[in-house]
Amino acid sequence: NSSIVIAIDGTSASGKSTNAKMVAKALGYIYVDTGAMYRTFGWHCLKNKVNLDDEKAIASACKKWKTSLERVDNHVHLLVDGYYPAREIRTAEVSSATSLIAAVPKVREWMKKKQRECIQFGNLVMEGRDIGTNVFPETDFKFYLDACLNERSKRRLAEGVQENLAARDQRDSQRAAAPLMVALGAKVINNSGMTAEETSKLIIEEIQRRL
Ligand code: C5P
């Protein structure tokens, strides 16, 4: 498969989604939000009262759930029982649950397989935590976004969500399975004080230089 994958990883609220969408639109690529895939599973676990302290229970919930990938315009969604819980997965409660289930190796294995399957839809801009390090390590296009905690907290508050970003970053960075880190060869962009337009322009220029 000769599809191109642009990997955009980084800390929570570092602007990955906004920028990944802008880059996908500018290049005519398909946007994949892997955080939404993890969130959908986190939400599913909360809904089904899976004990989040029990790795085995989480792993077996993952094995049992019925999902499908669906392309809608230039996005790919992971549906559970035919449904994409777009709004439900954006609460602070789901964010915390998600960073717990995301540390379970069996869950990550499952997600990686699904994420690689997205290549069937064409060229991708995929955002997450481990896309450049673990899901598509072979891609030549890797970006790592970050911004200072203060600015990231403000962005979340502007969205009406209050959450402990520091705790989530720490959990995402310190887990044993595919932790959040800068991939070898990734271009690191600290976008504190930058607009999304400025950040995405930087990313697009870098990609076009190398295409
Ligand atoms: O990007 P977003 O904040 O929606 O991701 C939610 C959570 O999903 C992250 O805090 C992280 O624990 C997990 N995640 C992950 N690997 C990815 C994407 C998300 O572990 N590739």
Image (cartoon, grey):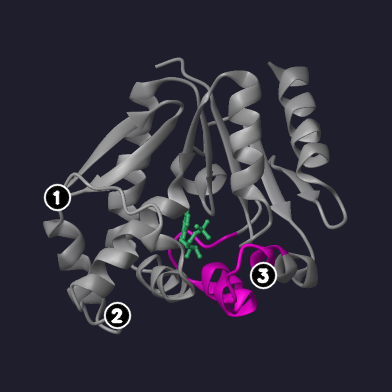
Q: Was residue 159 drawn as part of the magenta stretch in this picture?
A: yes
Dot 2 or dot 1, earlier in sequence:
2
Marks 3 and 2, how far apart at CA: 26 Å
In this rendering, the count of numbered labels is: 3
The residue beneath circle 1 is: 66
Residue at 16% over, 49% down: 81
Quarter placement of the N terminus? top left
Callout 1, which amino acid?
Lys
Up-down: is 190 above or below 118? below
Q: Is residue 201 left or right of residue 36?
A: right
Neighbourhood count class around disc 2 (C-alpha, 10 Å): few under 14, some 14–19, many 20 upward: some
Q: Nearer the viewer, mark 1 or mark 3?
A: 3
Q: Residue furthest left?
A: 64
Q: Residue at x 62, y 74 (%)?
A: 165
Label 3 is placed on what type of residue? Leu
- The quarter holding residue 72 reads top left
Residue underneath mark 2: 52
Sequence-wise, the earlier of marks 3 and 2 is: 2
> What amino acid is labelled 2 in the image?
Leu
Q: Position of residue 103 (x, y in %)?
A: 40, 69
Q: Is residue 14 above or below residue 74?
A: below
Is 134 rendered above or below residue 151? above
Q: Position of residue 26 (x, y in %)?
A: 66, 23
Q: Residue at the location (24% across, 82% down)?
A: 54
Quarter of the view holding residue 154: bottom right
Tell me, for residue 157, which label it has, or none: 3
* Residue 140 seen in the current view: no
Q: Is residue 38 left or right of residue 62?
A: right
Please report whichever mark, 1 or 3, sits nearer to the chain's N-terminal start. 1
Q: Secondary structure at mark 1?
A: loop
CA distance separating discs 2 and 1: 20 Å
Span colored in magenta = 155-180
